[in-house]
Amino acid sequence: MSDHASTNREPAEMNPFDLGGRTALVTGANTGLGQAIAVGLAGAGADIVAVGRSAPTETEAMVIGLGRSFKAISADLGSTAPIADVVAQAGPVDILVNNAGIIRRADSLDFSEADWDAVMDTNLKTAFFLSQAVARTWVAGGRGGRIINICSMLSFQGGIRVPSYTASKSGLAGLTRLLACEWASKGINVNGIAPGYFETNNTEALRADETRNRDILARIPAGHWGKPSDLAGAAVFLSSDAASYVHGTVLAVDGGWLAR
Ligand code: NAP
């Protein structure tokens, strides 16, 4: 191709990371990593549907400020009950980010069944059945899409005092691979992102504990906790044409934590 022809290409062809014309459904987008992902995807051109139990007021202002459209759907994702309604209200989407998640901390000798069920239901069961519901719309419409599951370092490691969280995030990494195997041929890319240690509500207890905070920091090659915005590029990549042959991977964004 001549230089002249290449300068006349459409912007989307020149930029494989461009998400213009696409819509992303992000769960738990009111705060933390979900907010950063929603804003990052909007910055790359995507319109946003935010699904969660708290009003995503701040995220809405940020997305609108980037010139993208924003729709909020109120739903408690601690059970599968709202899924059919969420998918109907969302309308057509191109990207699903399963981000909403919770953590419960206690010694395994004392860990309660309630803390097991709450975490497994939110982090794993809802992620699966929401993926199923969205993928069914894609298959019925004869089109593909992107699913990004927000995993964890505890998709790879054991951790301590978070048995249901480790089980759910290890399960989510396995599910990412299984769904990729089943759906890649349907044009659906299923991948995960494994954040390292990020400054959000989820890690407040760790950062408040002086010893844990010091130990964690000492082990991160980058030498600092992640900022939520550090995660956005990975989400844009996995949502974009640049990742069209990427299936079933769990991409660590961890300041080098797993490399230690
Ligand atoms: P966060 O600030 O606590 O955000 C969690 C999000 O999930 C919030 O939007 C929360 O809504 C939503 N959520 C939780 N339970 C819900 C429910 N039943 N229904 C609807 N929404 C619900 O923590 P975060 O760090 O951003 O976490 C985002 C994801 O990243 C989680 O899956 C977490 O496990 C994962 N992660 C975080 C880190 C880290 O270092 N921060 C590391 C690895 C993985 P509310 O605001 O209403 O509670």
Image (spheres, grey):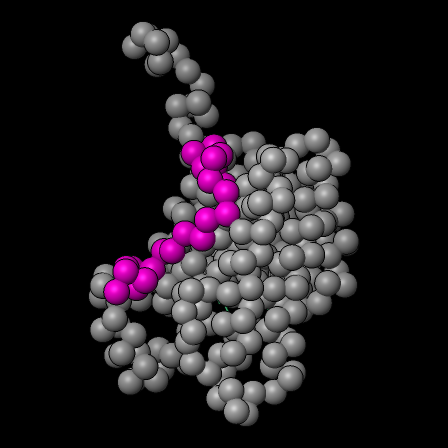
Q: Answer above or below: position of 68 versus 108.
A: above
Q: Is residue 257 rendered magenta in the image?
A: yes
Q: Answer above or below: position of 44 versus 15.
A: below
Direction from residue 128 to residue 64 in the image, left or right: left
Q: Position of residue 14 (x, y in %)?
A: 39, 23
Q: Position of residue 41 (x, y in %)?
A: 48, 44
Q: Position of residue 169 (x, y in %)?
A: 51, 65
- Residue occupying the point 44% across, 22% down: 13
Q: Nearer the viewer, residue 109 or 144?
A: 109
How many labels were placed on the picture? Answer: 0
Q: Is residue 257 visible?
A: yes
- Residue occupying the point 45% across, 37% down: 243
Q: Position of residue 228 (x, y in %)?
A: 39, 59
Give the position of the N terminus as an image quadrant: top left
Task: Give residue 216's quadrant in the image.
Answer: bottom left
- Residue occupying the point 64% across, 84% down: 113
Q: Nearer the viewer, residue 142 or 239?
A: 142
Q: Answer above or below: position of 115 versus 220.
A: below
Q: Residue furthest bottom?
A: 110
Q: Is residue 249 rendered magenta in the image?
A: yes
Residue numbers of the magenta segment? 239-260
- Residue occupying the point 49% across, 52% down: 192
Q: Is residue 69 visible?
A: no
Q: Nearer the viewer, residue 144 or 35?
A: 144
Direction from residue 248 to residue 212 in the image, left or right: left
Q: Nearer the viewer, residue 58 or 213?
A: 213
Task: Give residue 237's quadrant in the image.
Answer: top left
Give the position of the C terminus as an image quadrant: bottom left
